Amino acid sequence: MRSYPANSPHAAARLVALTMLADGHVSRIEAQALERLGLPNALGLSVNALSEVLQGLCEDLLSSSQGDWCRPVVDAALVDALLAEITEPGLRAEVLRACVAIAEADEQLADGECVVLMQAIQHWRVGVPGQHQGSLRHV
């Protein structure tokens, strides 16, 4: 897995990309939500740069699968390693908001998306963004 500097826009975007991939594919609805909500800019990247991070993550996941195509996209050790790259509280909150928005975009929370979101909440010890509005009610 390639590494990015701690708290960099690329490290933050990779967690959003992981949330997008957590159900096994990137849906058009998630990609549209990403742009509609201005998440690339909020994370400090262009749409193209975020696409490159997503592509890099896909390449890294494929190369680390070692032919095991039945393995889940998201595992706890990977999520923890990526979460550890974000240490600034404000950036953590922004990344978690972005991940929740992407996970909720298709109105379904897949198991992999829940893993990413719940580990972020536990690892970073933060409250659920938008909890008062019913966000993550299915988790």
Image (cartoon, rainbow, N blue to C red):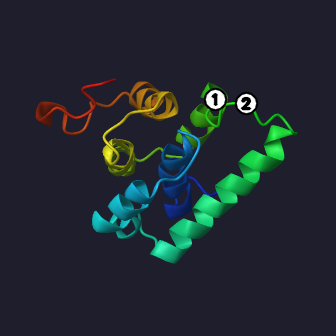
Residue at the left extreme?
Answer: 132
What element does badge 2 sit on? loop
* Mark linked to residue 75: 1
Q: Amino acid at mark 2?
A: Arg
Question: Can residue 122 be spotted in the picture?
Answer: yes
Question: Can residue 2 be spotted in the picture?
Answer: no
Q: Is residue 123 above or below residue 64?
A: above
Q: Is residue 42 above or below residue 115?
A: below
| C-alpha separation, residue under disc 1 versus residue under disc 2 | 9 Å
Q: Closest to the observer: 79 or 115?
A: 115
Residue indicated by mark 2: 71
Q: Quarter of the image for the C terminus: give it.
A: top left
Apparent side of residue 80 relative to residue 109 in the rendered image (left or right): right
Q: Amino acid at mark 1?
A: Asp
Q: Residue at x 87, y 39 (%)?
A: 66
Apparent side of residue 40 relative to residue 52 in the rendered image (left or right): left
* Mark linked to residue 23: none
Q: Is residue 101 above or below residue 47?
A: above
Residue 65 point in image, percent of width and height: 80, 39
